[in-house]
Amino acid sequence: MDFQNEALRQKAIIAQLRERFEKEYKETGRKKTYCCVTFGCQMNARDSEKLSGILEAIGYTRVEEEDADFVIYNTCTVREHANLKVYGRLGTLKKVKQEHPGMLIALCGCMMQEPQVVEKLRKSYRHVDIIFGTHNIYKLAELIRDRLDSGSMIVDIWKDTDQIVEDLPDHRKYPFKSGVNIMFGCNNFCSYCIVPYVRGRERSRRPEDILEEIRRDVSDGVVEVMLLGQNVNSYGKNLDEPMSFARLLQEIEAIDGLERIRFMTSHPKDLSDELIEVMGSSKKICPHLHLPLQSGSSRILKKMNRKYTKEDYLALVDKIRAACPDISLTTDIIVGFPWETEEDFEETMDVVEKVRFDSAFTFIYSKRNGTPAAAMPDQVPADVIKDRFDRLLAKVQSIASVVCARHEGQVMDVLVEQLNHQEAGLVTGRLGNNTVVHFPGDASMIGKIVPVYLKSCKGFYYIGEPYKKEV
Ligand code: 5AD
Ligand code: SF4
């Protein structure tokens, strides 16, 4: 397939639908609405911006309520719980649809890449109109047209893809910060993880496409970018002209007007010395690294197919801290992986104590069909897992509250993101290391980076005061 022509073809379909909707609008006097619900990670959040962009280009207006003319769930399947949530909400949506003739329901994202899910939807959820996966979201307009023309359920799932369609409409959620995909898919096959099966093999975007997108974002007022990929440290390996992630970061750093660069997610096994050096000398890369640990036990890490040991991880942390002394480290940890003994769990607790993370996302292991770990016996009873989970969370939180407070009394730059939801007269923003700060301010500050005196730390966030330099 020629993917440049494909983008043009999709744009033509968008234009046709737009015309069709405008005609309907003239007759009914009512604009059609859409509601896009995102489950899961930042990758999905970015995909939802692309879906929203297409829907708005067609002529739908965004609403937050799920009784819209077009409701789309962008699903996640990383843990079983995510799937259950979708089925639950689909049940509710059935009743909404009965009272709303002409409503369309679409499902896309990772959960749709699982054949047994699609089977179940086809059989028991006939009120769903369109089902597609992670590889063809750019086709949304075409799928809507096909559904409207055929009147029957449209299912379009691709197993994998080796191409990337650029340059379609997208609707960014924030005017001042953006998420930019630098690569798609994952080749790591950690034994518990379903992502490589639902997101396909690693594919990097061309650096010129990434740079152009960021330059465009910056000219629209963006000051912070989050570079997105399942494993950003292996960026560029499969390009015609291979390029390292560190090199890409240097090129992004050179973009005038861009103030902050973030990225997510890093795999410890691929984090190069070159990258550490670039992070150490950069003025724009934020002092924050999300470095999933998963387990502190080398024995469990081997069964997880993570390709590093506890010692490797600790040595890497030392190396990073030597180059970037003030960096915030955050992580992901899974509790209750098959074969995890009390000793293995103690190793995880030991790494948490040694590294002193700024925060950690802790997960109870969830068996995912089709992954190698799903065939391993469940050896850890649920009550033992729950007990370990609670102990881990308590440790993570008590360390984080001390670690996060280390900047108390300092003045640091905050990117103001929004008005505070709870208290009038306050705004909410983030430090470079991603810690949240609330301080007095108004809507005119949103999107600006301002110096703030960090008066007191309340566990995971700061209360601050605007800082005015004395002259
Ligand atoms: N069970 C529990 N947590 C999981 N993760 C990925 N797969 C599973 C699973 N089967 C967690 C990992 C990963 C994060 C995004 O989700 O910690 O880093
Ligand atoms: Fe899943 Fe491992 Fe790939 Fe992360 S690196 S998406 S945990 S397989």
Image (cartoon, rainbow, N blue to C red):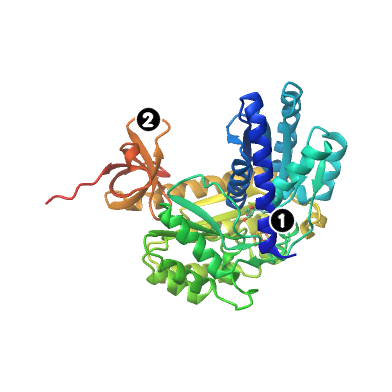
Q: Is residue 313 above or below residue 96?
A: below
Circle 2 is placed at which residue position? 423
Q: Position of residue 253 (x, y in %)?
A: 42, 67
Q: Is residue 316 above or below residue 419?
A: below
Q: How many marks?
A: 2
Residue 336 visible in the shown view: no
Q: In the structure shown, which secondary structural element does the residue marked by tag 1 occupy? A: loop
Q: Specify which label sits upstream in the sequence, 1 or 2.
A: 1
The three-letter code of the residue at mark 1 reads His
Horizontal arrangement in the rendering, residue 104 relative to residue 15 (left or right)? right
Q: Position of residue 238 (x, y in %)?
A: 65, 74
Residue shown at 49% from the left, 67% from the top: 317
Q: Position of residue 89 (x, y in %)?
A: 71, 32
Q: In the structure shown, which secondary structural element does the residue marked by tag 2 occupy? A: loop
Most extreme residue toward the bottom, as rendered?
241
The three-letter code of the residue at mark 2 reads Glu
Which-is-in-front pick, marks 1 and 2? 1
Instruction: Assess disc 2: are there few (<14), some (14-19) or many (≥20) residues with their C-alpha within 10 Å of its C-alpha.
Output: few
In the drawing, what numbered circle is on residue 108?
none
Quadrant containing the N terminus is bottom right
Circle 1 is placed at which residue position? 135
Residue shown at 40% from the left, 70% from the top: 280
| Dots 1, 2 in contact, CB < 8 A | no
Most extreme residue toward the top, as rendered?
99
Residue shown at 75% from the left, 36% from the top: 87
Instruction: Assess disc 1: are there few (<14), some (14-19) or many (≥20) residues with their C-alpha within 10 Å of its C-alpha.
Output: many
Horizontal arrangement in the rendering, residue 313 relative to residue 96 (left or right)? left
Residue nearer the viewer, 96 or 29: 29
Most extreme residue toward the left, as rendered?
471
Horizontal arrangement in the rendering, residue 461 relative to residue 18 (left or right)? left
Residue at mark 2: C-beta within 8 A of ligand 1? no
Residue nearer the viewer, 349 or 264: 264
